[in-house]
Image: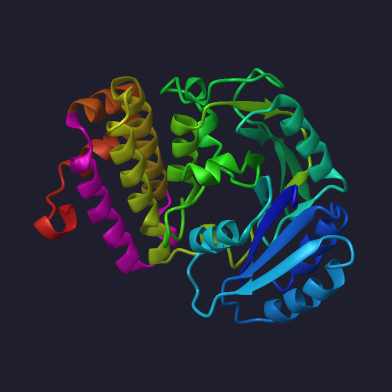
Amino acid sequence: MVKLSVIVPFYNVQQYAPDTLRSLRANARADFEFILVDDCSRDGTPEILQRAERELSDVAQVRYVRHEVNGGLATARNTGLDAASGEYLTFLDGDDWLAPGYYEQLLGSIEELGCDFVRTDHVQCTARARSVHRVPYGRRGVLLDPRTAILPADRSTSVDYAFAWAGMYHRRLVEKGILHFTDGLRTAEDRPWIWRLHREAESFAVLGHLGVYYRRGVASSLTQIGDVRQLDFIRAFDQVVRETAQDRDAAQLLPKAVRTYCAIISHHLGSIERFEPPVARKLRSLSAAALKRMPQDVLDDALDSMDVKRATRLRRLRRRPVTAEVAA
């Protein structure tokens, strides 16, 4: 039986894929499975992955899957989840890398704890700079109820640390329909996903293992591109608010969901110059409509709790008229 499936989407990362693949070799085991998903790359990535499928097969089980149409990160991860057979699952992005032996260490911890999932710290890499980023939760190495890590609303919590690759997950989450992503989301795909994990899973733990190296500032990353795909954060957070409103603890959890949504809108508006002009106009109109869709009493409280600069920006946007088509 496959013990661990590692799902690795790639898209136009020929410069970085060799590092990623070398780090997988340094984490290989005969009962590990590496699922390499090429999301219709147009550079040399497919050839690199085809070669890796052959070369890694002596140390692990390897599957190479290629999309004929680019579907985005969420869809590529779902392709990997559908192909995976492991008792445990994890993710890695095609431009990041791992410390040697990291997966074996993480697997040992989740098996010992017996929980649905674990979350881990990571190292962020921007050019030559390195910085450690911690899961924003204090208790480490003990079983916890995932719902208790969603609040408080006015502080960074585990649902704000949404990196799918910063953890490991038991197969029962796939069987319960919790681990898949929303198909077609081009950005913020991990936000509805992490909220669902914390609302619906039964147990988790936070670990201090450092072994994932997250590469920032990659030119092909959507975080560096100011085009219309960035606006998928609105669809993502609409889903977070909609699903949280149906939760049994909606009264307690909605303030956190709405406040986070407002903070993200304000963040994008604060750097609107990086967007192409038509996209900037669309960002304003879609964000104004999003504010009108939120529960208005919860929105009032969220704006009252924010600093003056962000609250003023959002209140001004809230007064902006929107068409019925945009509001829908």
- As rendered, which of 322 and 122 lies closer to the eye? 122
In magenta, the rendered stretch is: 271-296
Residue depicted at 55% across the width and 59% down the height: 82
> Is 166 drawn above or below residue 327 in the view shown?
above
> Is residue 293 found left or right of 225 in the rendered image?
left
Where residue 311 sits, quadrant-wise, is top left
Residue nearest the viewer, comparing 224 with 68: 68
- Left or right: where 309 falls relative to 90: left
Residue 239: give x, y in percent of width and height: 33, 45
Relative height, residue 10 to residue 110 (above, below): below
Determine the image quadrant of residue 123.
top right
Give percent across and percent down for residue 114.
Answer: 68, 28
At 44% from the left and 38% from the top, the residue drawn is: 196
For the point 74% across and 32% down, the residue is 111
Residue 283 magenta: yes
Quadrant showing the C terminus? bottom left
Is residue 266 a member of the stretch shown in magenta? no
Residue 144 in view here: yes
